[in-house]
Structures are given as C-alpha cells and as structure tokens.
Image (cartoon, rainbow, N blue to C red):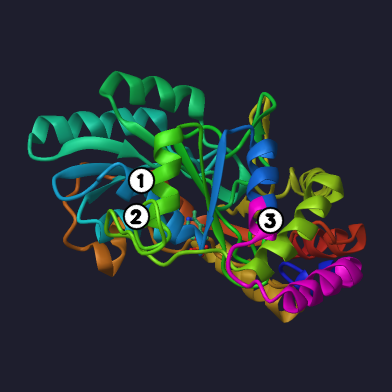
Amino acid sequence: MEFRDLKRQYSVLKNDINDALSSVAASGIFIGGDNVLQLERQLAEYVGVRHCITCANGTDALTIALKIWNVGPGDAVFVPDFTFFATAETVAAEGATPVFVDVDPITFNLSPQDLERKITSVLADGVLHPSVVIPVDLFGLPADFPAIKTIAQKYNLHILEDGAQGFGGSINGKMACSFGDIATTSFFPAKPLGCYGDGGAIFTDNDKWADIAASLKVHGRGAGKYDNVRIGMNSRLDAIQAAILLIKFRAFYGNELQAVNAAAVKYTELLQNVVITPFVPQSFNSSWAQYTIRLSDNSTRDRLQNKLKEKGIPSVVYYPTPMHLQTAFVDCPSFGSCPMTEMLCNTVLSLPIHPYITTEEILTVSSEIKHTL
Ligand SMILES: *Cc1c(COP(=O)(O)O)cnc(C)c1O
C-alpha cells in the first residue's frame, strides 16, 4: 500500500498528461507562456480572488508574501507551533522573529485564544512589533479565519494564509487561499493539488501586492526585462508543471476532492470508536492533505505505527517536533508555552489517504488498527 498513491493517479490521467508533456516539449516554451497564464487564471477563479501568481514552490510563495509587506528585523510574526518547518523558516530568513502559537487539539489549527495571549505577551515585552499572523490550513482543513480575522483587526496584523496543504478546502462555500490578505499554496507532488516537481502560488485581491509579487518572482523586474526596481528572486513555475497542473486541476475539482472526502468519511465511520478521529467543524470542508488520528499516548502511537509497518501499511508522524523545540529555533525568544502542540507531536499518526484509495484498503488499515489497540 502507498501512503499517497501518485502512480495510481498517473495511470488514470496518463493520456492527457503525456499529451501535455509532449506539447510543451514541441512548443519550445519552457518558462512562462500560455500554460502558466491559463493556470493562474483558472486557479484565481476557483479560489475566488482577483490574482494568482505562480512561483517555484510554496516556501518561495511565503517568502514573496513577507517581502511584499517588508517584513524584517523587529517584526513579530505569529506562526502555529504545529506545522511544517517552512512556515516559520521563511519568517526567520527575512530577519523577523517567529512567535510560536499553540494549536487547538481538536482541529490541529492555530488557536485564536492563544494567538491573542501571545500578541499580548509580545506587546507587554515591548521589543517586537506584532505585524503578521500566518494561519496554516493544516492537513487540508482551513484555519478558524472568522475568529482570527477579529483578532488581526484588533491588533492591526496582516493575515498570510499558508494554504500549502489547504487548497480545495472551504468555509461556508468560501474557498481556502481566499482568507488571507495574501494566501499561498504549494504544488509539491504530495499536496492536495500537486505537480511533478516543485511549484507554488500566491493569491490576493490586492492589485498593488499582485504587481509586486509578479516583480519579485522575476528578479524584481520593472517595466522591461532588464529594468530591475527591487531585489527579488528567481522563482517561476515551469511551463511543464503548469501543463500538468491544468490536467490535474480538472481531475481535482471534477472528482478527486469528492473522492478523498468519501475516503475520510469511511475512515471516520470505521475508526470513530477506536481512536480520536479528525474533526471537521460545522460549515468547514477539508481537502484532506492528511487523515490524522490521535492515540492515547506516545507508546501506543509508536507501537501502532510499528505494527502497521509490519503489515506493509505506511503511516507518518506529521509532526514529531514542535517548532519551538526545533534546533534551528533555539535562539528564538519564547512568549509562552505550547502544551497542546507538545501533546499532539507525541500522539498523532497520519494514515494513507488519497483520491484513489479503495474501500478495501481503508478496511484493511482500519481493522489492523482495531486489532492492534
Ligand atoms: C509543504 C508546505 C510548505 C512548503 O511548500 P514547498 O512547496 O515544499 O516549498 C509550506 N507550508 C506548509 C504548511 C507545507 O505543508
């Protein structure tokens, strides 16, 4: 069994993908071009924002967003303690200070209560200027944007939505990657919408920020190709990746998002009285980048993972280490503890899930879990 079976997806989309690859090869246009423009147009429309600017990966997308707002030394940027490293890494790389915020143990997403606690603590300390909050749509579930927006407005923070895992999720029908003042996503192969290499995108309704993003991703270009108005990056999405994404995006909204939700429902039906299954709040929809269960304690989690491995069932601990305990962040000042994240790192386990998983495979995984516990 595969954790995320991309080969099965390819076998379904093979003809279209092969055609797309050969037509890019024949066109001789490998950077930019019509495929990239079409993709940006389609993704912006789907998400419901004015602008989508593609770039080289989800990490660069975050970096570009921070650069647009001139985030740097002296700025406090609030990030969840329970996330992938890049969310906080990009903040530190710009010279700003990541302030780690605990998460809600039920949704795994940024806790609005702890966000306000950490902001208050930074303000009381009086050294850093609270400037941005980066809620992550973890495992495919949008963060609690209604509550986060209220706090962001109160303290005058920009919201940067890290939707690397969240593309396709929604709240009350409003799509993920439309909640932040700027939002970003990743097309890393294992993400909900993945390409065949690295890729990413930035979303915003703000015309001026969209222009700056488009400039930053191409060496800070100005009006012409050799006119450079700011220090930028080389961060473009390849035409080949855009062509693949156009095919995969059609499958994504056509049937994959529905299929992966059906898989999650099946898992929950089979496991809800066995382990703590993931919770999707009323009016929220997940794109199920991961299906993550919680076990009673660390030794049960590790024992289960080993047992599944013996049976040929892959599982992954997303994430084993809270950001505040990462070696790279030892010098970051602490503005309070994150006990829920520490608990989750010891007890979570992500199970195989993707749009092409079969009911039989879900039954196999679930019954192995039941027998082990
Ligand atoms: C994957 C991921 C990123 C980084 O995306 P890349 O395309 O791999 O650079 C950032 N944030 C989160 C939450 C992610 O899961």
Crowding at dot 2, Cα within 10 Å, few <14 / some 14-19 / many 20+, comes out as many
* Amino acid type of the residue tagged 3 in the rendering: Leu
Gap in Å between the C-alphas at discs 2 and 3? 22 Å
Residue 88's disc is 2
Residue 274's disc is none
* Residue 324 lies within the magenta run: no
Percent coordinates x, y for residue 188 in the rendering: 59, 65
Crowding at dot 3, Cα within 10 Å, few <14 / some 14-19 / many 20+, comes out as many
Magenta range = 10-37
Q: Earlier in the sequence, mark 2 or mark 3?
A: 2
Q: Earlier in the sequence, mark 1 or mark 3?
A: 1
Percent coordinates x, y for residue 168 in the rendering: 68, 43
Residue 79's disc is 1
Whether residue 84 is visible? no
Residue 245 shown left or right of residue 126 in the figure: right
Q: Earlier in the sequence, mark 2 or mark 1?
A: 1
Gap in Å between the C-alphas at discs 2 and 1? 6 Å
Gap in Å between the C-alphas at discs 1 and 3? 23 Å
Q: Secondary structure at mark 2?
A: helix
Dot 2 and dot 1 residues touching (CB under 8 Å): yes
